[in-house]
Image (cartoon, helix red, strand yellow):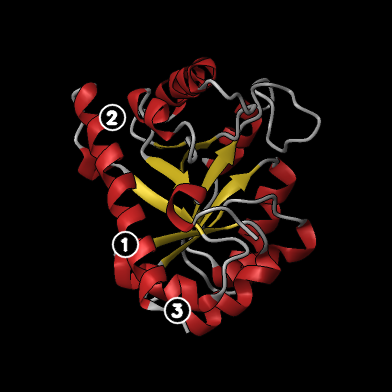
Amino acid sequence: MVDAEAKKFLRENLVKVQDKIKQAARKVGRNSDKIKLVAVSKTHPNEILRAAIEAGAKVFGENKVQEAEGKIEEIGRENAEWHLIGHLQKNKARRAVQLFDVIQTLDSVALAERLERICKEQKRESLSVLAQIDLANEATKNGISEKDLPSLVKFLQTCECLKFDGLMIIPPYFEDAEKVRPFFRRLREIRDDILPNGELSMGMSHDFQVAIEEGATLVRVGTAIFGERN
């Protein structure tokens, strides 16, 4: 059971984040209605997610298929949109196809081939995917390299079921959000080259305003909405 104080906390946080989205968009002459807020709900229980929906959240981002499974089954896909924003292991691909509305972390041709095949087997006509790009070559991060991206794009253009909707990045963490700007800018340049009207999923709690200034259409915000994770 979520008490009134917790509901108020969520409601106020959502309003603050939405206000910051509007401010950042206004600063660069963008329409904030074109920017989708993905509430990063990993580790938070179903009752908190229900309270977040009540407060106005419409889209949730989950890192792990296994954790998301119970949430999506209980809360339902008719009540929220569900995005996979964590690394997708091959052995979880089938369940991911069954559960998620969007997979933001497609990072190889092999995974794309698997998802396309599973969609056909499951008779899922369309699955939205974003290609996750690793621009910093960080050993701890997943994502396809910029040089390998063309082969993935080429394959996605042949797919019947996978709908290639844009690009995603998890850049290096800097205390100073301005230091992340070059990564956001480069992702936008790549997007403009290969998919001019595609989505740009970039920006988290500490840097989403910079991401919006650089063209983000999806921002993934957890801590600023739900507070620090336990």
Task: Report the side of 22 relative to 164 (left or right).
Answer: left
Residue depicted at x 49% and y 34%: 206
The nearer-to-camera label among 2 and 1 is 1
CB of mark 2 within 8 Å of CB of mark 1? no
Against 208, is 228 above or below? Answer: below
* Residue type marked 1: Arg
* Residue type marked 2: Ala
Task: Report the side of 52 relative to 115 (left or right).
Answer: left
Residue behind mark 1: 11
Residue depicted at x 42% and y 76%: 50
Measured as percent of width and height from the top left, residue 172 is found at 64, 26
Q: Tell me the crowding category of disc 1: few under 14, some 14 to 19, or many 20 or more residues within 10 angstroms, Cα based.
A: many
Whether residue 19 is visible: yes
Q: Earlier in the sequence, mark 1 or mark 3?
A: 3
Q: CA distance from mark 1 to mark 3?
A: 13 Å
Residue nearest the observer in this picture, 205 or 7: 7
Disc 3 element: loop
Q: Earlier in the sequence, mark 2 or mark 1?
A: 1
**Count of numbered badges drawn on the protein:** 3
* Residue type marked 3: Val
